[in-house]
Amino acid sequence: MAAAPGTVRITLAHHFDRDGAQLLPGDEIDVPTHEARKLITAGYVAGVDPNDPEAVAKALATAAERKPSMAKPPANKAAGRASE
């Protein structure tokens, strides 16, 4: 399931209490981008070095920004492969 607009999905690196729920390292949660930034800075997001701007930007990218576009091959090219 993709994160809602304005949110990102993160994987926790440490135990975390959110809204009374005890979350464990490895749990994935959807959080607003501003909250994700705070968690990254505090070192709570697995696999993201808070001192690496590229890693932080990648972690904060929404699912739509991360998803590469999958272009369909032209119809004639697809038809040519089918006849092989």
Image (spheres, rainbow, N blue to C red):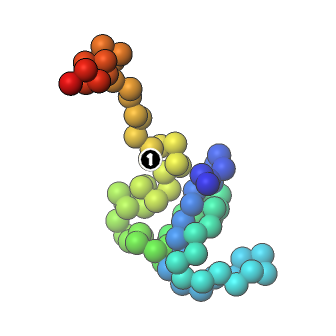
The local crowd at label 1, few if under 14, some if 14 to 19, many if 20 or more residues have their Cα within 10 Å, is: few
Is 26 or 46 nearer to us in this picture?
Answer: 26
Q: Position of residue 78 (x, y in %)?
A: 31, 22
Please, is residue 55 above or below residue 39 in the view? above
Q: Quadrant of residue 74?
A: top left
Determine the secondary structure under disc 1.
Answer: helix
Residue at left offset 52%, top offset 48%: 63
Q: Picture coordinates of residue 10 (x, y %)?
A: 54, 65
**Disc 1 residue type?**
Arg
Q: Residue at x 61, y 54 (%)?
A: 1
Q: Quadrant of residue 50?
A: bottom left
Q: Which residue is mark 1?
A: 66
Q: Is residue 28 above or below residue 7?
A: below
- Which of the pair 27/16 is nearer the observer? 27
In x, y percent, where is residue 79? 31, 18
Residue at 57%, 60% (x, y): give it: 9
